[in-house]
Amino acid sequence: MPDRPADRMRDVTVEPFPAAAPGSVMICQGQTRVLCTASVERDCPPWIKRDPDTGQPTHGWVTAEYAMLPGSTPDRKRRKTDGRSTEIQRLIGRSLRAAVDLDRMPGVSVTCDCDVVYADGGTRTASITGAYVALVQAIRWAQNEGRLDHDPLLEPVAAISVGIVDGTPTLDLDYPLDVRAEVDMNVVMNGAGHYIEVQGTGEQDTFDRRQLDALLDLATAGINDLFSVQRGVLA
Amino acid sequence: MPDRPADRMRDVTVEPFPAAAPGSVMICQGQTRVLCTASVERDCPPWIKRDPDTGQPTHGWVTAEYAMLPGSTPDRKRRKTDGRSTEIQRLIGRSLRAAVDLDRMPGVSVTCDCDVVYADGGTRTASITGAYVALVQAIRWAQNEGRLDHDPLLEPVAAISVGIVDGTPTLDLDYPLDVRAEVDMNVVMNGAGHYIEVQGTGEQDTFDRRQLDALLDLATAGINDLFSVQRGVLA
Amino acid sequence: MPDRPADRMRDVTVEPFPAAAPGSVMICQGQTRVLCTASVERDCPPWIKRDPDTGQPTHGWVTAEYAMLPGSTPDRKRRKTDGRSTEIQRLIGRSLRAAVDLDRMPGVSVTCDCDVVYADGGTRTASITGAYVALVQAIRWAQNEGRLDHDPLLEPVAAISVGIVDGTPTLDLDYPLDVRAEVDMNVVMNGAGHYIEVQGTGEQDTFDRRQLDALLDLATAGINDLFSVQRGVLA
Amino acid sequence: MPDRPADRMRDVTVEPFPAAAPGSVMICQGQTRVLCTASVERDCPPWIKRDPDTGQPTHGWVTAEYAMLPGSTPDRKRRKTDGRSTEIQRLIGRSLRAAVDLDRMPGVSVTCDCDVVYADGGTRTASITGAYVALVQAIRWAQNEGRLDHDPLLEPVAAISVGIVDGTPTLDLDYPLDVRAEVDMNVVMNGAGHYIEVQGTGEQDTFDRRQLDALLDLATAGINDLFSVQRGVLA
Amino acid sequence: MPDRPADRMRDVTVEPFPAAAPGSVMICQGQTRVLCTASVERDCPPWIKRDPDTGQPTHGWVTAEYAMLPGSTPDRKRRKTDGRSTEIQRLIGRSLRAAVDLDRMPGVSVTCDCDVVYADGGTRTASITGAYVALVQAIRWAQNEGRLDHDPLLEPVAAISVGIVDGTPTLDLDYPLDVRAEVDMNVVMNGAGHYIEVQGTGEQDTFDRRQLDALLDLATAGINDLFSVQRGVLA
Amino acid sequence: MPDRPADRMRDVTVEPFPAAAPGSVMICQGQTRVLCTASVERDCPPWIKRDPDTGQPTHGWVTAEYAMLPGSTPDRKRRKTDGRSTEIQRLIGRSLRAAVDLDRMPGVSVTCDCDVVYADGGTRTASITGAYVALVQAIRWAQNEGRLDHDPLLEPVAAISVGIVDGTPTLDLDYPLDVRAEVDMNVVMNGAGHYIEVQGTGEQDTFDRRQLDALLDLATAGINDLFSVQRGVLA
């Protein structure tokens, strides 16, 4: 089990990583590593509403894809979009959309791709934290390119996993902790301290209200540290 | 908007519905109707562990599938398993597995199918509440057939949706409410009053801890009523 | 084997069944139960011809989908569109199109969905008999909505299975009879007593002209009874 | 329209065509040309029953696949297995199985492939007539190879299409006739003059019993001529 | 092993073969037989550039599909597009495009389909040699139909396989030679003696520059003979 | 156009890159970056031969997968295995198998995954050069783990692209050069200076023997430099 205390997060870095997409970072959280890129798409999805007079889209869109690279697990991970990946990429997309005012980015559609290079627990929350930075990079690029008249960014968004391990509420589960956890919770928050998503699951046991409260307290503290890391790389 | 107060659930009935599967009920929650059947499979999934000596499976399995029938929505719903369905059926499966001790049903695999006949909000939570009843029917059938030596049932499981609509915490969102809700939360509990799953999403707004608490209180009251309905049909 | 004589049909009921689609009935034929809904689609299929001057569709379309729900068979039926389903839904679609004058429903496209809840033989013919009723409901709805200027309905359409079982021509095969039948025939007729489709198959034996004639006589009598049931529910 | 009388079939030839499969013929019926090959498979389908003592299959199997080659139609035909192909290959398979005693070919599985080179109407019935010859070639080969102890062949099988064109019952519809036909019927018979399959469809009109009888008479005469052609090539 | 010397090609014929497509030939090279048809498509691919003023396509396209028919191998070949087929049809397409000036066939798109009837080695190169003839037939047809104002044909194109078998550079590998070959090379040339494609692979051994030169010399001689065969059928 | 002379390669580095797979490097060739990982699979492919007495596999296997990550191109690359990817991963697999003696690694199956992070030309050849290093890492790991009794490694393998640009034979095409190239050739060699694969394609023009020779000379020089880089990282 880890040497760190139950309320201490793993070391986290977010760094620019050269790719062709306008947004691209590698986030490392302990051994977990995720490449997050953000691409500005040429076309909006077909269901974006358009102004009946001008025919122009009236808002924009942000979506995400999540995949584990084959070498990210000790036993090779086959390339396929399974139910788990689908669920995770929907969560990432919802979380990132809470970081922008879609009405202020008409006709601009950003796809954030989160490709896990090393999977050691917490890949979905690390993806959100990292993809937010790539999204900001891509939006700044779009502003420089003249494709955005306004700044659509709202509060920053970050996420962390927490859980109950051997009865103890624990911050930032790595893979060995995640396997042992009775309860697992992913929390997504914004810079104003509000929740965007709370997903608690009794994997091996149920949980009561008191435990839920303890997990939310841990998560809040952890996410505040992640905002600092994000600000550092975006400065 | 509905005539009922924000803390009052829609009318709920769960009734046996003739099908070939050993478990089969129709749950009606307001206009929402879901056909829930439970089939005992001939084969266990390949990843169920087996006793090295006897070659027999050492535990059982419970899983779920969720689909919307084409006539369940005013505009015809195309038959396909999209990301939303995948996510929902994973949630139903996890919830139902919390209702049984898998170690006490070795070699018995139950699939619960939730087919939405009329979709008016809350289909995933109604699926859980109804599928639990079908699961119990199937397990009783398997016991009668001599395929189960023990009773694997633990506490009952039920689920409800809650949300914040126009700033008001509201129980049991129908479709018009769901569309207007700023925050949407699905809560799965067991008969001991413990959480199995808490999934809160800020669809159109974020939410703070106080709002989260109000939603959990509403959900608890609603789920207790659902346990009564379940007991009635299973008596 | 059944108590009923070889020339007597199982009990048949067709009743409205609440769903969101404008046409929706449950047909029960003995134990066989099929949910038949009819939806009016927003878009016509791309191959519907259009008036070169107005760009408007010059006729309409009726199509069908057929599926067995997982709980419809004692061993769970996996959800997939196999060759048998494809063949059946093509038959249902052709049969229903014979019930309407497509030229009198320009731009209106109806999809009839037949979902088998309990499969005990004769599901394809019950689907036709039930879907005709749902189709009429949907067309009446479209007329009320002002989407149809004319009444496109022609003669009613119904269908029955017949077969040779232990050498005896037999009406309305349930599953145990179907398994034992040497010859199996599905007959679709309209209210004028004309054939729309005759599909006879020597499953386990061939058949001669005399046997073919006996089967057609049985089918004609049975289908006339089905027209009475349809008239009852539509009155 | 064709110069030939309504009760006269197009010219038909069936000739061996070099391929690697043990059975291989080209059938030409007017302009329609279908390459029919028959392969003896290494493995039986998984659902063939096996003797509980010896573990050996207790019977054999015959199946078929049908495809239109891209160059078989004036506008290029895309390669895909659509509903029509599925339906046709199921019909071909059922028809060919009526030509053999599966119990006399334990463990031998034959797949007949019908690839349409030129599509000018009647491809499904020409496929049956030609594939029967390829099937006989493959079975003789398997006997020579010592893979079959008995001769499983029963009566020969052939098929023809008939229809009502401009009110006239007509034998052997080519494509222009097929397009104009009010009623279309495919008849599969065996050498004893018994029906294996009768599929009549009112494509543009319904039909009565008298018309059905006229079509069956025409088909019987035509199929008898096809048996002569088959005997010629197999002699 | 073959009686022919290592520098002698198998007998080759290319003959018109009746199909509905405007170009259609059967090429036989030893036992290898490939049906090559060429269809002029109604629609250009979406990525063909269009003149901004007239909206008309500014050039044309030639593409290819390759498939092995199930009866083409002693053990039945399943119908599917695997990696090998994909690679081969891309090679055929590239080779045929070198035979035409796409700018001189605006809006005309030709698909060449190569369906292997008998596979005895060299099917991809025989496909190129045969498909070139079908392509010329289709282009002549399009000129006659008035769909082409100019003749887009450049130099003819043909292809051959060569390899090193038991240390000896060998022309035109049939299947038994191909299996034994240490090195395998496919060469596509045009009538001016220039290379369009050279693909050498050390299947079981590597090869040096001297061996490469010997293989290219053999291929050049063989391809010149193929041009004569093509001229014969096209005269 | 590049400042470097036509016979000078871009800067190349190959460095270990942390992942969970036993082999993992990032190769950078100019701006092109490919993550190459090598995983030792638990199961051999089903077609690996087994010793009839012991039931143990008699040899091993090496295969490859190739994909472009969505952020690797300025316009987002959709995740899918198209024809080009299939062709490339077959080439990588063949090339790597030439680097090992499969008979000396019985029962060991290695999959090399090449995921392009930044695509600026030459991704398939960079994948081969990088994947060879990851393969060696994985084989050393398998030896340390006791899963390999022998060292199966033969000569090293590396690859480079060459082409004719504006009439000039040019080494190591980046994307802008590749687009302009009249002829494009990929060369795979081993440490003994022998060819494993030579694939020359006249993309926009044909080429003669003299040009082919010039391209092979350039490639040989470039690949020798790559062997030095590989030795450096593996030392």
Image (cartoon, coloured by chain):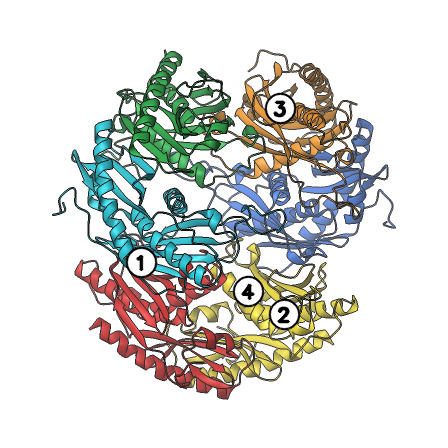
Chain colours: A yellow, B red, C cyan, D green, E orange, F blue
Q: Quadrant of residue D108?
A: top left
Judging from the image, mark 3 belongs to the subunit labelled E
What kind of element bears circle 3?
Answer: helix
Judging from the image, mark 4 belongs to the subunit labelled A
Question: Of tags 3 and 1, which is closer to the observer?
Answer: 1
Q: Position of residue C86 (x, y in %)?
A: 40, 44
Category of crowding for the residue at label 4, using alpha-carbon neighbours closer than 10 angstroms: few (below 14), some (14–19), many (at least 20): many
State the residue at coordinates (28%, 55%).
C231
Q: Which residue is mark 1?
A: C234
Q: Is residue D47 left or right of residue A37?
A: left
Question: Of tags 2 and 1, which is closer to the observer?
Answer: 1
- C-beta proximity under 8 Å, tags 4 and 2: no
Q: Which is nearer the N-term, disc 4 or disc 2?
A: 4
Category of crowding for the residue at label 1, using alpha-carbon neighbours closer than 10 angstroms: few (below 14), some (14–19), many (at least 20): some
Category of crowding for the residue at label 3, using alpha-carbon neighbours closer than 10 angstroms: few (below 14), some (14–19), many (at least 20): many
What kind of element bears circle 4?
Answer: helix
Between A12 and F134, which is closer to the camera in this rendering?
Answer: A12
Q: Which residue is mark 2?
A: A130
- Distance of label 4 from label 1 (alpha carbons): 48 Å
Q: Which residue is mark 3?
A: E126
